[in-house]
Structures are given as C-alpha cells and as structure tokens.
Amino acid sequence: MGGHGHPYSPAELELPGFVPQRLSQGQILAPFVGTAVLAVLGAWLISGRCGGGRISKTDRLLMGWWVFTALTHIVFESPFLFTPDFLSKKNPNYFDEMFKEYSKGDSRYASRNTAVLALEVITIGLKGPASLLAVHILQFAVSLGQLYGCLLYFITAYLDGFNFWVSPFYFWAYFIGSNSSWVIIPTLIATRSWKKISAAFQAEKVKTR
Amino acid sequence: MGGHGHPYSPAELELPGFVPQRLSQGQILAPFVGTAVLAVLGAWLISGRCGGGRISKTDRLLMGWWVFTALTHIVFESPFLFTPDFLSKKNPNYFDEMFKEYSKGDSRYASRNTAVLALEVITIGLKGPASLLAVHILQFAVSLGQLYGCLLYFITAYLDGFNFWVSPFYFWAYFIGSNSSWVIIPTLIATRSWKKISAAFQAEKVKTR
C-alpha cells in the first residue's frame, strides 16, 4: 500500500475513502474464468444439439465467443458503471472487488477517467446487447466497434502518461493480456465477415449478369 | 476576452501564452466551405464524365461525400494534431486560426483533452485514408467508425462537464451543427450499405439453393 492509502499507480493519485481489497486475486479470477468457460461450453453444446448438425464448428465456436463477450460486457462491466463509489463502499460485493483488482492493471478505472467511462457506456449500452444478436453483418459491425474501442483505450492510456499499472506483471496480465482477446478475436471475425460479404457480392454479380 | 486572457469556456481554463485570434469567423469559414463545395462538385463532375453514365446519381453524391470527409480529416484536422502549440504561435497560420475559432464551440481542442486527441489520431490515421478507398463494405466500416467516434465525442463532453462553449450560438453552430453531418450522413450510408449487403446475401442464398 502506497503513502496515499491505496496500491494503485501513480502513487500520488487521490482516492479518498478507499476501502482495501478483501478478496484475493484467485477468489476474483476463479468465478470469472468459470463463468466464461461455462458460457462457451454451454453455447457449444446447445448449438450442437439444437442446430441438428447443420451449424459448422466455426459458427458454434463463434456463438461461444458472442455469449462470452455479451456476458462480460453486460454482467461484469455494468456494475462498474452503476457503482461510482465502488472504491469506498463499506461492504463491497464481488464486482466492486473485481474492479479494485483490475485497477492494479489500469488505475483509470479507480479514478473513473472520462475516456474509460465513455468507452464503457458504449460497450455496455450497444456492443453488449448487439453481441447477443450477432448475425453476419452485425458480427462485422460489432467486431469493428470492439477494435475501435480497444484502439481508443490504448491510445488514451498512452496520451495520459502510460503509468496506470502497479508493476510490469499487471501491465502484461491485465492491461495488455485481458484486453488482447478483444483485439485478436474481432480481427479474425471481421476478416472472416469481410470475406463472406465479398463472396456474397461476387455471387450477386455473377447471378445478375 | 475573459479574465484568464482567452475567450474560451470554462473561463478558469489555463492557456499560458495564448495569442489572440486574428482572422474573423468569415475569413476562417469561407475557405473551408469553398474547398468543401469544390470537392463535392469536382467528384460529381469527374464521376459523371469518367463513369460513362454507368454510375448512379446516389453513388456520385456519395463520392462527393467521401472526398469531402477525407479532405476534412486529412487536410483540415491533421495540422491540429501536429501543432501542439497552435494557441501560442507568434505567427499563426490559417489552420491554427481555424482551431482557435472551433475551440469557441469546444474548448477541449484548446486544452488538448486526451479523449479528443485520441479520437483525432484515429480519425486522421484511419478514417481519413479509408474514406478515399471507400467501396461498399469499407463504406459501411468507415461510417460505423464515424458514428462510434461522434458518440464518444459527445459522451466524453457530457461526462467532463458539458461547459466547453462560449455561448449557445457556438454550442449549436460548432459543437452540434458542424458534427451533425458525421452523424446523419454515416447513418444514411450505413443503412444503405446494410441493405445492399443483405440483398447480396439473399441473392447468394437463392443462387446456391
């Protein structure tokens, strides 16, 4: 714990009324990872059973991704938006503790930085719900939104001083690591959608000739 | 001019070394509007002549829009990004004066707010060049990016206090007015692209049945 009564970086950050984290890293990560695995597995099994074998394995995996990303945006991120006092609550719940832990990787969550808040508003309000409806074109649209959001997230961090993590571990594990899925997977999906859309246009052209 | 030596809002904003604006509103707006009209007209005439009558009027108008938007992003906005000292330059050029004028509608440009800078980095680096290449799918992608950017622009302004304009005139004319094209036109283009893509998928489905 730094001289300012909190573990975050930069140390001079003022966080009045900060209540220290009680749950350990493992206690916070286990439920999150467990829910994620269950969601992907559930989507895989249900799409296999109800699809009658007509849905390709790629599409079934993609369904798992969309359920996982919707769940993260709606269930795990929205408590952050609606709990401005999560750092100072006397009886913090799981979600409050989760964002205290994540703030070790990016203290802009602890200080409620404007750009981060704005990104979360869009993520929770638009990309979360849209993920649940993601058909081909919408998959393309939402994936582009995720890429755009991640780009802004990293650029604003850079412009604001790039010193929001407690240590290199938290920089790589939280700030880079946990966000990289939202760079890699949307890139793959956007590329795939682009090809599918191009193929459809090609087919339309051939047909109307 | 406020007590802090500049005309912007909020008045307590510190802008050391501010050099007052020399060009009038008319002197700043006329070249911008003139260039825009020329660009749209040029795209219209060239696409009419070189397209051999095969390009629809809607597509020719759209070309005008993409030339205009690329021009705005690349020619008019990039000097802002690469001139961090535009407020204090002893011999300000047209672009410096232009952003002094626009700052009356959103002082976050004068104070070089992080979210605004990050949005400009993406706008100039990605959306500007992509506008010049905008074919069907890319038109959809870039329009979504413009909508996403405008949404973030307005949300960050709201979260940061919503007090960045000198008067209601500048709020409506600059902050709302000049940005509204990038809400209305991308919405129209995204809707049109969505329909075209859906039609292509439909045609592909019919064909492969």
Image: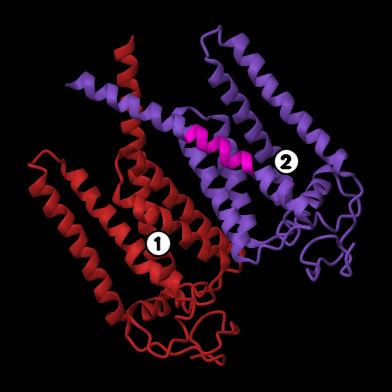
Chain colours: A purple, B red
Name the image quarter holding the C terminus of chain B. top left
Three-letter amino acid code at the position of disc 2: Phe
Does the magenta run of residues contain A181?
Answer: yes
Does the magenta run of residues contain A166?
Answer: no
Judge from the rendering whether residue B106 lies leftward or rightward of residue B208; answer left or right. Answer: right
In the image, residue B6 lies at what x, y percent? 50, 88
Q: What's the residue at 81%, 60% (across, down)?
A: A8
Which corner quadrant of the image does residue B191 belong to? top left
Q: Is residue B23 above or below residue B121?
A: below
In the image, residue B69 lies at what x, y percent? 32, 58
- The residue beneath circle 2 is A76
Q: Secondary structure at mark 2?
A: helix
| Residue stretch rendered in magenta on the structure | A180-190
- Furthest residue in direction top, as rendered: A52
Q: Is residue B25 above or below residue A91?
A: below
Q: Is residue B46 above or below residue B198?
A: below
Helix, strand or loop for the magenta stretch, by majority: helix
Q: What's the residue at 43%, 72% (across, down)?
A: B80
- Find the distance from the CA under tag 2 to the CA under tag 1: 33 Å
Q: Is residue B188 visible?
A: yes
Q: Is residue B171 visible?
A: no
Q: What's the residue at 51%, 9% (across, down)?
A: A54
Disc marking residue B179: 1
Q: Residues within 10 Å of mark 1 (few under 14, many from 20)?
A: some
The one of A198 and B97 positioned closer to us in this rendering: A198
Judge from the rendering whether residue A196 lies leftward or rightward of residue B54; answer left or right. Answer: right
Q: Residues within 10 Å of mark 2 (few under 14, many from 20)?
A: some
In the image, residue B53 lies at what x, y percent? 8, 41
Q: What's the residue at 76%, 33% (across, down)?
A: A33
Judge from the rendering whether residue A144 lies leftward or rightward of residue A43; answer left or right. Answer: left
